[in-house]
Image (cartoon, rainbow, N blue to C red):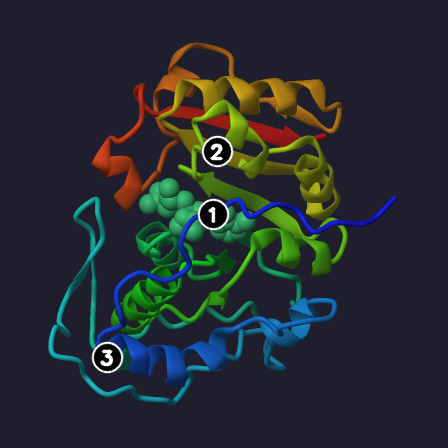
Amino acid sequence: MEDRPPLRSYGRTKARALKPRQAGLVEALLPHLALPEEGAVDLEAVFPLSREGAELSPLAGRSWPAGPDEGLAVSPDGASFPSPVASRHPLPSRGEGAVCAAPLILEIGFGGGEHLVAQAAALPDARFIGVEPFLNGVASCLRHIEESGVQNVRLHHGDARDVIARLPDACLDLCYILFPDPWPKTRHHKRRLIQREFLADLARVLKPGAEVRFATDWAHYAEWTLELFTRDVRFAWLAERAADWREPWPGHVPTRYEMKRLGDCAPVWLRFVRA
Ligand SMILES: C[S@@+](CC[C@H](N)C(=O)[O-])C[C@H]1O[C@@H](n2cnc3c(N)ncnc32)[C@H](O)[C@@H]1O
């Protein structure tokens, strides 16, 4: 059978023209943070470690021109990160000889990157990969990275399914899929990111015991996702009481899409564990 690429699960990849500062970040900063465009993703090359075990950031020692709106970067939940870039969060050393890999966290469809960067600031010792095909979102994320000074984020401008296919087996500790495009019309359901084949691909790259955190405010997409995950023997739903799916997990940072309340129900929060 012909091996067709999956249908696009996203809408537009570019909206308004980038502002000069955003375009500058895409040109100057993105190449330092971007995953390789093709081939297997070598995580040790993407997140290099120094001899002491501390991560070497591609941003270390660089200074980026201060933008007009530089100051305190404020996340959607009101937390502020110090800026400018000079006050980056230092990555703690893991001590001599302790070269165990830091947790690896993937965010699929990070939108403007507020959640991704807030999580990366909260967990400076973890490694984050964010994937987003919408260029304006990537540019916005770069601005958050620059303003917050986080050093533990790498990005891919494109389709997360391409990245997952290039990741090594059992490398991920956590995967966020927050408010994915809902594709509410029946004829568009095949465009939804959550499909049986996608779960198989995702299962391959998750470590045993790793978690998938999914949220949507579209009732049919919540049911769809729950059904696909619970039918897949490689996953188990981590819910014991109604509050587990009605309320976000601890430490959640509201996303831009979540705050728009565009769906047809209150947000549904689903956590699955890889068996
Ligand atoms: C409705 S938006 C939500 C954005 C963000 N998570 C939020 O909550 O604000 C869904 C995002 O997923 C992205 N997306 C859709 N399909 C994707 C894919 N295959 N890989 C990566 N991102 C994808 C879209 O470009 C879009 O930015």
Identity, as a three-letter code, of the amino acid under mark 3: Arg
The CA distance from mark 2 to mark 3 is 32 Å
- Give the image quarter of residue 259: top left
| Residue 151 position within the rendered picture, expressed as x and y whole percent measured from the top left | 42, 71
Identity, as a three-letter code, of the amino acid under mark 2: Phe
Q: Nearer the viewer, residue 70 or 161?
A: 161
Sequence-first tag of 2 and 3: 3
Graded by Cα atoms within 10 Å as few (under 14), some (14 to 19) or many (20 or more), the crowding at tag 2 reads: many
Q: Residue at x 11, y 78 (%)?
A: 68
Label 2 sits on residue: 214
Q: Viewer-nearest of labels 1 and 3?
A: 1
Mark drawn on residue 234: none
Sequence-first tag of 1 and 2: 1
Confirm whether residue 176 shows in the render: yes
Q: Is residue 169 above or below residue 178?
A: below
Label 1 sits on residue: 10
